[in-house]
Image (cartoon, rainbow, N blue to C red):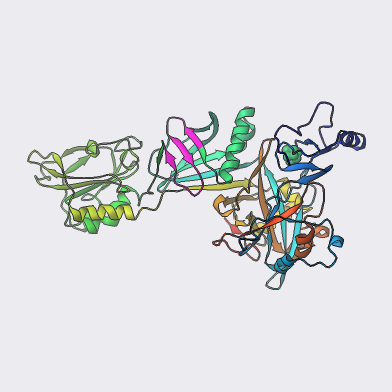
């Protein structure tokens, strides 16, 4: 099947919405050898043998099909079966014996939304509403591909390095696609994508944002530049590359925490330790940890703003030097030494929060620090700081709002789904991965893309992101919330024939293993905030 992004968009003189695509126009389309896809508002008119603008739907012999196979999950799948497409038959009657080796897995299978097709224009029941038994209980999973205009990615980058000012624009291909948000403990955070950039700017901004989001969700590398900050390459589950340098370590803690953790080990080997940190620089003899160990004050006078004893803010500007500051010379953050307290021969260790930078000094007769080789037993503690740093990684969390029209594919009474989730009756997953449900109104879910199958995300040129979502509950609870009971089909039937409709339906399924760290999605309560 030839894929193209250009074929399929509405043409001059052809109907541009479903209502207009009534009999005469539809007949006109047919005579042109085209079919209309109404799986999203773009309403592509697709020529025979071609795909629509999103590459997800195609015209095959005059029928609209969903191009990709739908992903079914099992706890474990042999390598020979993994991702091997198995074609659906059109009806149960085509397979009267009902035999298919895969049916043995009917009570061990989970249908994901990946490749399942969607419910647009919303009132249609979800393409897969699948019943199965779990530990003797009748359950149902409602499966759909959501089209999300309201969604974003929250990025956690484990590094001390300064990536850019909070609130700074983050750019991709020159377009603004997000911003730097509040840093967390040992990590810099970005908020990327979202409705503002998808729909609120230029056409190019929307397109670049959409493609960047799909790439991130599909675990691919993305290149970004932060205004007034760094150039970044980020990819889920990989080390970030900051200004061309792959990051190695996530800090053991802030400067104050590092002082507290290692104070006892330093005792007797050093007279003063400064742990340089962009946020909270720690000074051992002034810090409560040093005081508890009865260490005499060293007389060091630090630059920056003293917060509490032994804890200093703003010792330097943020940057990519020591401890996320802009300094290359650690002595530049020492104002002076108090001659009443300091003494010649005083042993001083200065280190960053990862131990990546560390220097050893002694004060001379003029109370000036002079760098010397670091003693082996002190080096051992610096190495231990490094050993306690976890590898620096990029985490990519999908955050999407499923509280809108998508619910109509589940129930005739959408508030029933929202309430049932909040009552912990419905588990929400994204491609089988656990989804955290935010508190408050709506169904705002968040999932780690690393736990989702590869290529879970798609796009439509509205522009919006396509993402899988599944709702699993007891069959009785589904009935109670106003579910589309007439469309509930057994797992056996679904394994054989696919989704309930044939217009734009997936033609085949593939098996994949659920991530070993994930709970089986059926029989689990939701992760409620
Ligand atoms: S889902 Fe894809 S093929 Fe169908 S109308 Fe939208 S863009 Fe076109």
Q: In this view, does 300 lie to the left or right of 424?
A: left
Q: Is residue 455 left or right of residue 264?
A: right
Quarter holding residue 368: top left
Residue range highlighted in magenta: 223-243
Split into quadrants, the picture shows ligand 1 in the one at: top right
**Rendered position, 21 above or below 290:** above
Q: Give the residue displayed 66% in from the left and 64% down from the top.
A: 522
Percent across and percent down for residue 39 are 76, 42
**Rendered position, 234 above or below 175:** below
Q: Which residue is most to the right? A: 24
Residue 366 part of the magenta-drawn span: no
Viewer-proximal residue, 388 or 51? 51
Camera sees residue 220: yes
Q: Give the residue displayed 72% in from the left and 48% down from the top.
A: 406
Quarter holding residue 342: top left
Work out which quarter of the rendered image holds the N terminus and state it.
top right
């Amino acid at each position: 099947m030839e894929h193209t992004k250009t074929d399929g968009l509405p043409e001059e003189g052809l109907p541009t919405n479903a209502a207009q695509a009534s009999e005469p126009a539809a007949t006109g389309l047919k005579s042109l050898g085209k079919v209309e896809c109404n799986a999203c508002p773009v309403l592509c008119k697709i020529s025979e043998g071609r795909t629509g603008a999103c590459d997800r739907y195609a015209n095959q012999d005059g029928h609209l099909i969903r191009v990709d196979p739908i992903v079914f999950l099992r706890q474990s799948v042999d390598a020979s079966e993994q991702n091997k497409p198995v074609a659906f038959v059109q009806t149960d009657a085509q397979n009267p014996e009902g035999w298919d080796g895969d049916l043995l897995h009917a009570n061990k299978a989970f249908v994901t939304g990946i490749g399942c097709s969607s419910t647009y224009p919303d009132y249609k029941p979800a393409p897969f509403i699948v019943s199965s038994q779990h530990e003797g209980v009748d359950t149902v999973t409602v499966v759909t591909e959501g089209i999300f205009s309201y969604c974003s990615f929250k990025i956690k980058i484990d590094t001390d390095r300064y990536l850019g000012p909070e609130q700074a624009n983050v750019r991709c291909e020159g377009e603004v696609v997000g911003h730097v948000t509040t840093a967390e403990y040992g990590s810099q955070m970005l908020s990327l994508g979202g409705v503002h950039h998808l729909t609120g700017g230029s056409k190019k901004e929307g397109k670049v944002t959409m493609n960047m989001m799909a790439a991130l969700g599909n675990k691919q590398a993305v290149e970004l530049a932060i205004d007034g900050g760094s150039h970044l390459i980020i990819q889920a589950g990989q080390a970030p590359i900051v200004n061309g340098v792959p990051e190695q370590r996530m800090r053991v803690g802030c400067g104050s925490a590092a002082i507290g953790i290692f104070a006892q080990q330093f005792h007797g080997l050093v007279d003063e330790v400064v742990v340089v940190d962009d946020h909270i620089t720690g000074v051992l003899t002034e810090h409560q940890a040093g005081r508890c160990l009865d260490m005499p004050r060293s007389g060091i006078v630090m630059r920056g703003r003293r917060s509490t004893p032994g804890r200093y803010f703003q010792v330097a500007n943020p940057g990519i030097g020591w401890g996320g500051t802009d300094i290359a010379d650690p002595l530049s953050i020492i104002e002076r030494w108090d001659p009443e307290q300091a003494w010649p021969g005083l042993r001083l260790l200065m280190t960053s929060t990862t131990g990546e930078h560390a220097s050893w000094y002694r004060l001379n007769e003029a109370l000036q620090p002079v760098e010397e080789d670091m003693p082996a037993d002190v080096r051992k503690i610096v190495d231990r700081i490094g050993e306690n740093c976890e590898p620096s990684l990029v985490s990519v969390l999908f955050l999407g709002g499923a509280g809108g029209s998508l619910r109509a594919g589940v129930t005739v009474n959408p508030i029933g789904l929202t309430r049932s989730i909040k009552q912990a009756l419905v588990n929400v997953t994204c491609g089988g991965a656990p989804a955290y449900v935010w508190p408050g109104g709506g169904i705002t879910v968040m999932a780690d893309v690393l736990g989702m199958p590869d290529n879970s995300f798609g796009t439509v040129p509205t522009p919006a992101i396509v993402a899988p979502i599944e709702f699993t509950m007891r069959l009785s609870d589904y009935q109670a919330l106003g579910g589309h009971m007439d469309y509930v089909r057994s797992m056996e039937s679904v394994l054989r024939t696919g989704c309930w409709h044939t217009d734009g339906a997936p033609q085949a399924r593939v098996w994949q293993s659920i991530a070993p760290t994930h709970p089986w999605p059926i029989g689990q309560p939701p992760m409620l905030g």
